[in-house]
Image (spheres, helix red, strand yellow):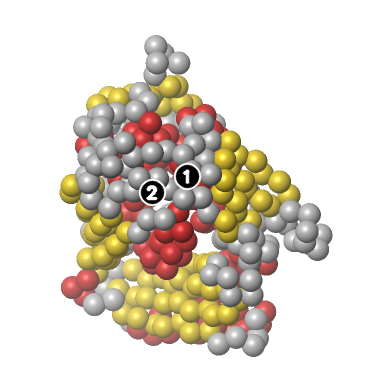
Amino acid sequence: MDGDRVEIDGGVMEGGGQILRVSTALSCLLGLPLRVRRIRAGRSQPGLRPQHLSGLEMIRDLCDGQLDGGEIGSTEITFTPGKIKGGTHIADTKTAGSVCLLLQVAMPCVLFAASPSELRLKGGTNAEMAPQIDYTVLVFKPIIEKFNFTFDCDIKRRGYYPQGGGEVIIRMSPVKQLSPINLTERGTVTKIHGRAFVAGALPIKLAKDMASAAVRCIRKEIGDLYVNIQPVREPDNQAFGTGSGIIIVAETSTGCLFAGSSLGKRGENSDRVGIEAAEMLLGNLRHGGAVDDYLQDQLIIFMALANGVSRVKSGPITLHTQTAIHFAEQLTKATFTVTKSEDEDSTKDTYFIECQGMGMINSSL
């Protein structure tokens, strides 16, 4: 601690942008001045990239805070938060940096604002190393709303690597408090659906090939279920640049959602893209948890803020999740326990993540 400034080491554990997102969001929510050193020390190009900087600037603006060291490539920042306010907030990565990662840092904060918020997020909607916007709408949204809030996601324009150029508008109202969640009953898979998309200069045939390859791959393992993957060509006025990809979602009888996704790359076989997404989905279904590997870490900050005990059953705990838990415990009064599930047949690698939340209260409401 420097005076009463919390010191965060951005190079430990996962060592990436997630440490920055979790710690600055909690700093903003709890009114804790923060210094983050060794930002993204674990990455090949350490320091702030454009999407991290635009996320920080958005957090600064939505709480009238003060940010020092906010430049591209900077490996240390100090942040002093003010009071969270609603209204319209704009963040533009000016690159293909992910709008979904911008949403991850802003959403917990605006939940505890004084009035409703509109977030205008610009950048990549379907970007590498981040959830696709389709994942945010189809999987993240229905599950995260179990914490007892809702949000509206309007995809104005999709944007792809390398230019970005996408825009998403998120609208949400603040809450007094978050309810805890219980996601422990897996149920049986009842439905598998998805979308394979192309945009810009790419032919619809690529989307059809991705969808067919994914369906064939899933059928080998789950033969008795109808799999509906729609090939789509994004309208030119709703997409910027050229891109392709696929997302596949499995729904269960208890309302659990699992996904697999993949993005096309220049020169890559479209069958390969479809198979990669299908294999990711099947891997998520095999471990026997109630959430997929990508939702796991995104739940942690909400569990920490909620009032009461949340329980989530998951597959193997990812490094991203371990990192989120580490910083949530460091900054809040929440306590987490992770235990291996004993009630399964021993072939399954499942865990329970339990959290006694801090019971954050919105003092503005």
Q: Position of residue 256 (x, y in %)?
A: 55, 67
Residue at label 1? 306
Residue at label 2? 104
> Considering the numbered disc 2 on the image, is that residue within a helix, a strand or a loop?
helix
**What residue is at 26 percent from the left and 73 percent from the top?**
200
**What residue is at 73 percent from the left and 57 percent from the top?**
349
Position of residue 351 relative to residue 264, above or below, is above
Q: Are marks 1 and 2 in contact (CB under 8 Å)?
A: no
**What residue is at 53 percent from the left and 54 percent from the top?**
181
Gap in angstroms between the C-alphas marked 1 and 2 = 16 Å
Local crowd size for mark 2, using a 10 Å CA cut-off: few (<14), some (14–19), many (≥20): some
Asked whether 311 or 351 is in front, the reply is 311
Q: How many marks?
A: 2
Q: Position of residue 312 (x, y in %)?
A: 60, 54
Q: Amino acid at mark 2?
A: Gln
Asked whether 140 or 336 is in front, the reply is 336
> Considering the numbered disc 1 on the image, is that residue within a helix, a strand or a loop?
loop
Q: Amino acid at mark 1?
A: Ala
Question: In this image, 86 relative to 320: left or right?
Answer: left
Q: In terms of image quadrants, where is residue 264?
A: bottom left
